[in-house]
Amino acid sequence: MDKLLSVDGLKTHFFLKRGVVKAVDGVSFALAAGETLGLIGESGSGKTVTGLSILGLPPRPAGRIVAGSIRLDGVELVGLSERTLASEIRGRKIAMISQDPMSSLNPVFTVGSQVAAPIRAHGLARGRSAMDLAIDELARVRVPSATERAGNYPHQFSGGMRQRVVAAMAIACKPRLLIADEPTSALDVTIQVQFMDLIESIQAETGAGLLFVTHDLGVAASLCHRIAVMYAGQIVESADVRTLYANPAHPYTQGLLESLPKLGARQSRLSSIKGTPPDPLSLPDGCAFHPRCPHATDRCRQQAPPSIDLGDGQRASCWLLENA
Amino acid sequence: MALLDIEDATCHFDMPSRQVVKAVDGVSLSIDRGQTMALVGESGCGKSTLARLILRLEPLTGGAIRFDGEDVHHLQGHALKRFRAQVQAVFQDPYSSLNPRLRVGAIVGEPLKAHGVPRRELSARIDAALTMVGLPSQAAKLYPHEFSGGQRQRIAIARALILRPALIVLDEPISALDVSIRAQILNLLQDIQSELHLTYLVIAHDLALVEHMSDVVAVMYLGQIVEWGNSETLFSDPRHPYTQALLAAVPRPDPTFPRARGHVTGEIASALEMPSGCRFHPRCPDAIETCRSIAPLEHMVAPIHKAACHLVDSAS
Amino acid sequence: MTDITRDAEITTTEGQSGFPFIAATVLTIVVVCAAFGPWLAPHAADAISLRDAMTPPAWEEGGESGFLLGTDNLGRDILSRIIAGARVSVVIAAYAILLSGGIGAALGMIAGYFGGVPDSIISRLIDVQMSVPSLPLALLFASVLPPGEGMVILVIVMTYWTWYARIVRGEVLSLRERDFIALAKVAGVSTPIIFIRHLTPNILNTMLVLATLQFGSVIVFEAGLSFLGLGIQPPQVSWGGMLSDGRNFIEVAWWLITIPGIAIMASCLASNILGDWLRDTFDPVRRQL
C-alpha cells in the first residue's frame, strides 16, 4: 500500500530561556490513504506538537522543526516556505479539526461563509458557487436543512453541530490528510458516537487519511486502525489496534490499559502507574519512562532503548523486549 | 437515618429574557453514611448545580436539603459553621481550586483556621493531611505552581479531609488529570474513604469510573433524575432508555467491541426550551404518544432500583 | 503542551528589556529628587537674584556653571526649581494614587464580588463619574475650595478612582468564579477573610500596574491644572506652574518652557513604559500561574 504520509525522524524542539524542550524527539510513522492512525499520549507527550509540525505550524517563536522529514504523497514538506504551505498545503491537502469547536469558528460570520472561505481561498470556486459547495459540505456532515442553516451564526448551533461545521470546513477542499486533535473530548458520550460515525463516513467517501490525536484510549480503540503511543516526545509503541489492546508490549502501554476502570469489570482496586509524567525540561537519562517503570533495570537508567520490531507491524522501544 | 436527604429540590434561574432555566427541577435523593453515591449525566443536565446546592453555594428555589436531619439552606450561626466543617468538596480543575498566591500549607490549613483550631496545632495537622495524600511535608512551604496537576489534586484532597468531614462532594475529581495519574487518585480517594469512614457524592460523566467507585447511582437528564439504583443492578440491567443509551455509548478500550449504533439521536435540549411530557422523548428511540404529553413518574422497578419511564413496568 | 506554548511567549519579550531599565532609572531619579530635594538642589528654589536673570543653560553661550539649566526672569535656578517641582508632583501623585486606588479597589471588589444591587449602584456611579469631564470639575472645585495641593488631590481622586473600580470589578468577576473561592466558602471562611486572603493578593499586580501607569497621567494632569492656575499656587513650585510662567518668554528664553516640559514628558513616558512592562511581566499566562 502506498503511503500517504510518512514522517521520519521528526524532531521539534522548543528553545526557551530555561532550556530546550524536546517536545518531539525522533518520531517516525506512516499513514496510508483511508487509514486512521491514533496518536495517543498525555499532556506534554508531544502528540499535539507532532500534529502541528505536520501542518508546518510548530508553536512560534520558540518551536522549530530541527530535524526529520515529513512527506505527503512523496512531497517533502519540511523546508517549504510559509507561503507555499499556506497556499498549497494547509487547508488544501492537510486540514485540521481541533478540540474546541467554538474557538475554531468566528462568531461574527455565518457558518456558510466560513465553510466557503477555504474553498474561495484555494480558488476552487467563487461567489455563489463557493457557497453552494459549502452547503453541500454542510449536508455531507449531516447538518439538517443545510441550506437554511448556512445562514446562521455559530452561537445558534449546539456543541455537537458546531463540531460538524468545523468538520465541514476541514473537508471543504477535499484534503488528502485530516489531523484531528482531541475532536471528541469536549463532546458528551452520546454525541461522541455520532461524531465518530460521521468521521468514518467522511473517510469512506473521500479516502482521506486521518491522524487522530487523543488521550482517550476508549475513543481511539473504537475509531483507529493503528495506534502509536507517545511518551516524552517519542513513540514508545506502535501497532495495529487489535494487537495493541490485546498484547501491549511496552510497560507504559500496559500500565495505561490496566489502570483504566472498565465497565462490567467491578475491580475492587485499580492498578496504577506510579509517579508523574516527567518535566519536559529535564527528562530522565536512558529510557524516559524508567522512573515509573516497574521493570526498570540499570540498563534502562543509562541507555535509551532501540525500537524493536515484534512482528505483525508491532514495534516498541523497550530493553525488556530485546530478546523476546 | 440518611446522612444527606434531598427532597424535591429545585433550582431555577431567572434569565434577563424573562425565561426560566430549570437547572435542577424536583430532585429527591438520599445518601446513607459511608456510601458512595454517583450522579451521572451529560453536560447541562444539572448535576453540578445539584452539587452546588448541597454545598449551599447556590440558593435553593424549592424543596429541602437536609444534612444529618438539619435543613442546610436554613442553617445559621453555629449550626452553619458545624455544617461547613462536616461537608467539603473537591472540584475538577486543580488549577482553579488552589489560590496561586498562597503556600500549600496555608491552602490546606485554611479550613482549620476558619474553624478556630489553635495555631500551635496547625502545622502538625497540615503535615498529617499531606502525608495522608502521599505528599512530603516540605510541600507545605511551596506554591501551587510548583506542582503537577495530579499533585495539585492531592493538595485539594488534603484540604478537603483536614477537618475530618462526614461528606465530601467530588465533582469530576479525575477528569482533568492525565490518564496515567487517574488511577492513583482514584485509589487514594478509596483509601481515604475507608480510613476516615467518609461518605462520597461523586459527580461524573465517565460511567466506567462511576461503576468502579459507587454503591448507588443516580442518572440525571435535564434537571431530573431519570433512573436511580444500586450500582450493580443499574449497570447490569439499565431500564431507562437514556441510561441504556449512555451505557452503550461509553467508548471502551477494546477494539473488538462494536460501537453503539442508532441508539439515540440529537442532543440534550436547552434548559430554556424544555420538551413537553418526558424530557427525553425527542431523543428516545422508543418514544410513544404518551411520552410526548405526560411526564413519567419515578417508580420502583426492582428493590433499590427506580426509573422514570412510561415504558418500564413497575416491579410487582 | 499548553505550558510550553505559554512559555514560548516569554521569549518574545526578551528583546525589549532595555526600556524598562531606563524607565525605572528615570522614575527613581524623580522620586529621589522628591525625597531629598532640599539637600540636592544647588540653590533655594525661590532664591531671587535679578542680576542672574535669564541666564541660559551652562552649555549655551553666556551660560554659567553655577546655573546648570539656566535661570528664569527673576534669576531663580531652573534645576533647583525642577527638583522642588518633583517633590510637589510626587507627593500629589502618591496621595492621589493611594486614595483613588484604595477607594476604587474597595468599590470594585464589592461590586464584583456581591453583584446584584451593590454592583448596580457602584456601576452607575462609575458611569456618572466618567461622564463628568475632569476640567470643568476642577474649575468648579477651584471656585468653591481654596486652591492648592488638597484641591488638586481631590480633583484627581474624583477623576481616577473609576479606573481602578472598573478594572478591579472585572477582575473580581472572574476571580469569583474560580474554584478556590467556592472552596473557601465551603470550608466556612468568612467573607471579610475571603476579601483579604483570596481577592486582594490576586488583584495586587493589577493595582501596581494601574498605579504605575497612573503616575504619569497624574503628573500631566497636575501640571495642566497648575498651568491653568487652578492647581498649585506660587510661591510653591510646580512643573505646570513653571511652564505657565515661562510661556511669556518663549521667544527669548526657550529653556524656561522646554526643561519643565521635558521633566513632565520624561516622567510620564517612564511611568507608561514601566507600567506596560509590569503588566507583561505579571501576566499570569506568561508567568504560568
Image: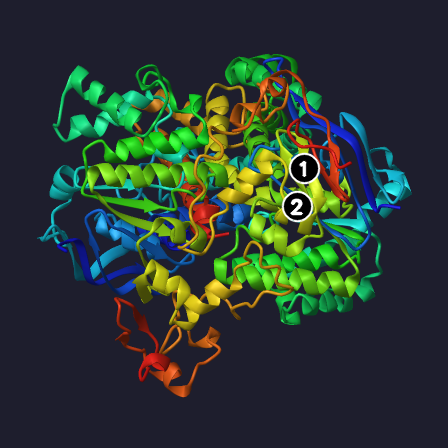
- Depth check: A319 or C167 in front? A319
Q: Residues within 10 Å of mark 2 (few under 14, many from 20)?
A: many
Name the amino acid, label 2.
Leu
Q: Residues within 10 Å of mark 1 (few under 14, many from 20)?
A: many
Look at 48% across and 26% down and name the residue there.
C221
Q: Chain of mark 2?
A: B
On residue B234, the disc is: 2
Marks 1,2: beta carbons within 8 A: yes
Q: Quadrant of the N terminus of chain C?
A: bottom left
Could you tell whether C182 is left or right of A27 in the image? right
Name the amino acid, label 1.
Glu
Q: Residue furthest bottom?
A: A298
Look at 20% across and 38% down and name the residue there.
A206
Where residue C33 sits in the image (x, y, percent)?
Answer: 49, 46
Question: Which residue is under mark 1?
Answer: B227
Which structural element holds mark 1?
strand
Where residue A142 sits in the image (x, y, percent)?
Answer: 34, 27
Q: Is residue C47 visible?
A: no
- Depth check: C148 or C201 in front? C201
Q: Say above or below: A77 vs B4.
A: below
Q: How many marks?
A: 2
Where residue B258 sits in the image (x, y, percent)?
Answer: 42, 48
